[in-house]
Amino acid sequence: MNQYSIKLERNDKKLVLAVQSNDTAHVQAQAVDICRAVDATQYSISYEQIEESVLAKLFRNLAFNNFEYTKCSEWEGSFSNKQPCFYVLGKRVYVRYSFLLYLDIPKDNCYPKPRCGNPNCINPLHFDYKTAKHSKLSPGDIEILKAQRREGASVIQIAKILNVHRATIYRHLQEVA
């Protein structure tokens, strides 16, 4: 494992992060992903060894998929609006949304929420991707709802299948109609 540092820039703001990588191609890929996640406009890579920050640790865990499905990963940094966040290059970035950007997942109409119920959890394996901020159904659940309705299932049956109130099903049926 090699140690690198990445200098990120946006406008006149700069940030240097410690990065661990298998090789130079891997560190370049990480730099591109991190730039996208923090909205940096450019980066440079060096062999300088610096101390790993909370943010660098977060991106290392993402790069090497160091998350376990059975364990919550508690955020150790800042919070804003009761959501895990960090401040970088003069901007507040919410951790869960930065994961979407890092992984190059389109974030339009996508709200990552921890299904484990822990508001401090940032384990991406615990996320449900909802279509609205307060939605109880994921995009996959909505597809199940539509399929069940086409098959003639009642609203009460669908609500039991998806473990939600029947009003939630009625609301989503009105949206897709």
Image: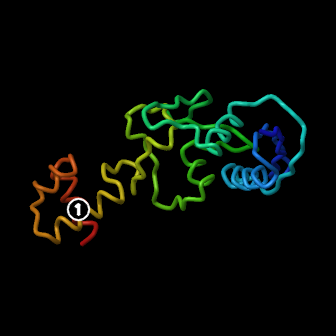
Looking at the image, which is closer to me, 14 or 67?
A: 67
For the N terminus, the image quarter is top right
Whether residue 48 sits left or right of residue 83 in the image: it is right
Examine the image and state in which quarter residue 78 appears.
Answer: top right
Examine the image and state in which quarter residue 105 appears.
Answer: bottom right
The residue at which mark 1 appears reads as 145
Whether residue 113 sits left or right of residue 45 in the image: it is left
The residue drawn where x is 61% and y is 54% is: 101
SS state under label 1: helix
Residue 126 in picture, x, y percent from top left: 44, 41
Residue 132 in picture, x, y percent from top left: 39, 54
The residue drawn where x is 39% and y is 57% is: 131
Residue 122 in picture, x, y percent from top left: 52, 37
* Figure label count: 1
Looking at the image, which is closer to me, 112 or 20?
A: 20
The residue drawn where x is 69% and y is 38% is: 87
Residue 29 in picture, x, y percent from top left: 73, 55
Under mark 1, the amino acid is Leu
The residue drawn where x is 34% and y is 51% is: 135
